[in-house]
Amino acid sequence: MQGEEIIRLEGLTKWYEDGHMVLDHINLTVRKNEFLTLLGPSGCGKTTTLRLIAGFEQPSEGRILFDGQDISRTPPHQRRINTVFQKHALFPHMNVFENVAFGLTVKKLPADEIGERVRKMLALVNLGGYEKRSVDSLSGGQQQRIAIVRALVNEPEVLLLDEPLSALDLKLRRDMQVELKRIQQQVGSTFIYVTHDQEEALTMSNTVVVMNEGRIQQVGRPEDIYNEPRNPFVADFIGESNILPGRMLRDGLVRFAGYDFPCVDKGIGEDVPVDVVVRPEDVAITGAAQGMIRGTVESVTFMGVHYEMRITGEDGFLWLVQSTAMTPAGTQVGMNIGPNEIHVMTREEV
């Protein structure tokens, strides 16, 4: 992670009158120019975290620091933060220019400055020349870009985005993921993004914060979150995983699925219970006689870039395996797993 700290959450807690705790004493640091994503299932507390940072809700306990100053009770309009919501909330009676310029007009900036800033922002999202168009005449993706630049034109130090792409179709959503990352890099603002879509999080973010049941499960770079999950929840939520019970025999050797496997994990202990994660794309299919593990292919599904196979091992575990080569259902196969493809987690971290 790069940049100085801009936001710090200290013991941030939120519960409602019925006693339901949404956030449970979370601590988090957000750095300048970072694209940070809060990722987790519905009800995990990610949107509540965003609303607390924006000032739309007040914490029950804990503090929100912005550049070292406590802003926990500061009204939203006094924070150097803007928010883009899932619904575009564009003004239908205003054209594109008037929508983007709205915040600057409220601030009563000179007309020349407003015009220059609006045109610059529209050019940033490839909508130059759209100033006089009705927002209702725009596509969903164009409307979302207008909503984003309407927030950015006010030059916030931090932009909060609450699942802004969820209403778009798959292709447009993927195009907008690339567009959002490009915009963030060009304007240099800090983006805090909320999503339940792990592909979005891995595609756009410098830092991913995985949340569940009001608590932070893991914080790290997308590569680290995917390759080195801290617990079974993260391993299962981020991509597909085979998660098996095992036993760490000693440094570099773990037993699971009835066999002993060399691995690269160390410092976990000797003869201790563990959970083992193997990603589907890291299992190599071979002939039954050549495999570390043997099994029977139960089903095959073509996924476009690969085949997804369900394979029942000799111990009864149902493996998920992804391969560019298809092996028909009913085939007896072997499966090999290299030391670097095995990730061992201590059972205590569950």
Image (tube, grey):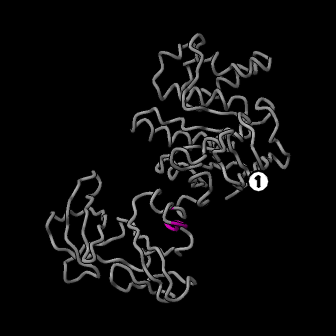
Type of residue at label 1?
Glu
x then y, percent, for residue 35: 62, 48
Q: On the image, which quarter does residue 124 sit in?
A: top right
Is 229 part of what is drawn in magenta? yes
Residue 193: x, y in percent? Answer: 60, 43
Against 92, residue 212 (above or below) is below
Residue 9 rendering spot, x and y as whole percentages: 74, 51
Residue 293 appears in the rendering:
yes
Q: Main secondary structure of the magenta part?
A: loop
Quadrant of the image occupied by residue 51? top right
* Residue 188 visible in this rendered orientation of the protein: no
Foreground pick, 334 / 26:
26
Residue under numbered circle 1: 10
Q: Which residues are magenta?
A: 226-231
Q: Is residue 347 one of those drawn in magenta?
A: no
Secondary structure of the residue carrying tag 1 is: strand
Toward the top, the furthest residue is 93
In the picture as drawn, the residue positioned furthest to the front comes out as 18
Q: Quadrant of the image for the N terminus?
A: bottom right
Q: Is residue 168 above or below residue 62?
A: above
> Is residue 295 shown left or right of residue 216?
left
| Rendered residue at 33%/83% (across/down) | 258
Q: Residue, x 52% and y 74% (percent of image)?
A: 347
| Drawn side of residue 298 relative to residue 105, left or right | left
Circle 1 crowding by C-alpha within 10 Å: few under 14, some 14–19, many from 20: some
